[in-house]
Amino acid sequence: MPLWQAELDAWFRAHHGIINATALHHLGCSVRTVRRMVDRQQLTAVQPGVYLSRQWPLGREQLLAAACARNPSALIGFTSAARLWGLRRVEDRRIHILVPHGASPKLDGVIVHRCRRIDEVDMVQRADGIRLTSPPRTLFDSADLLGLSAARSVMEQLLHEKRCTLDTIVGTYVRLAHPNRPGTRTMADVLASRPTWRQALHSDLELRVLEEIERQQLPPVESQCPVVLADGRVIHIDFGWPRWKVGLEVDDPAWHAGVEERHRDANRDRKATAVGWAVPRISKIDVQGTDLADAIRDVSVILQRRISA
């Protein structure tokens, strides 16, 4: 077995079965050897100068790795990067790459976006050879494709999971915003809709509830609102109007399915009621079905009674 064969196998294991001509040369494979491997179907050309080992299937990860191997300046971007980061409410399954303005890669099955402003802080190099945009840059670029509601949800996810800070997201917008640049208009609306003091929402369900609260024009609400119990302990409820001691909890079955969780929630509710708080709960079924507007109207009634009192 040639000396380079073991290194080539290791490369394939680390790079989803993808390699380009430059890497093959560095490993010691001559042009003639590469041609022979292609003729024997040991390698398949998936892009010009980019090859897939026959030991690997041609899937999405291989296509992403091939796009990066084809062009050293290319980044997986937009909703493709959002999927790699595990961001929610991403329905677009197309492959998007971002390249500097002036670059003209021809990549089969890939949507190419060009931009004059790609800074080092926007780039993340993975060990498997895939380069992608950073979380805040991904949010900015994807905002128009996601739409306002989904972009708001993704921003809350990034903040809750501490992928970046609100200052970083605002700084990314300030740095990149341009009337003709995708993401600018939607991100302006996303940032304008969020008070800087608000705690990050924990789930997409909470974002949908907040949007209905806003739609019905209830008073400004505090997320992760602290409530001081009689024994001095502090609990945090999903939403709260502390001036009138009205709260709202959003139950996700993933968090509230067990007996112990239900017992804990009932205990919290009882302790909050003992210090004068009204804390109704709404479920995932309420949020995702047709009852969300009705549930928030009920909360509005409770609020109005407290305000009148």
Image (tube, grey):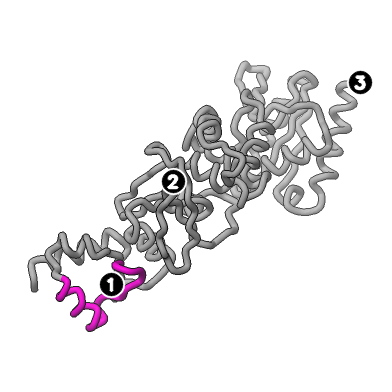
Does the magenta-highlighted stretch encompass residue 44?
yes
Looking at the rendered image, the disc whose residue lies closer to the viewer, 3 or 2, is 2
In this view, 132 is above or below 51: above
Residue labelled with disc 2: 133
Q: Is residue 59 left or right of residue 201?
A: left
- Residue 243 in picture, x, y percent from top left: 77, 18
Residues at marks 3 and 1 touching, judged by CB atoms closer than 8 Å: no
Q: Can residue 273 be seen in this view?
A: no
- Mark number displayed over residue 308: 3
The answer for how far apart the CA atoms under marks 3 and 2 are is 51 Å
The answer for how far apart the CA atoms under marks 1 and 2 are is 27 Å
- Mark number displayed over residue 53: 1
- Residue 13 in picture, x, y percent from top left: 26, 63
Q: Is residue 139 left or right of residue 58?
A: right
| The quarter of the displayed image where residue 245 is located | top right
Q: Which of the two labelled residues, at mark 3 and mark 1, occupies the earlier sequence position? A: 1
Residue range in magenta is 31-50
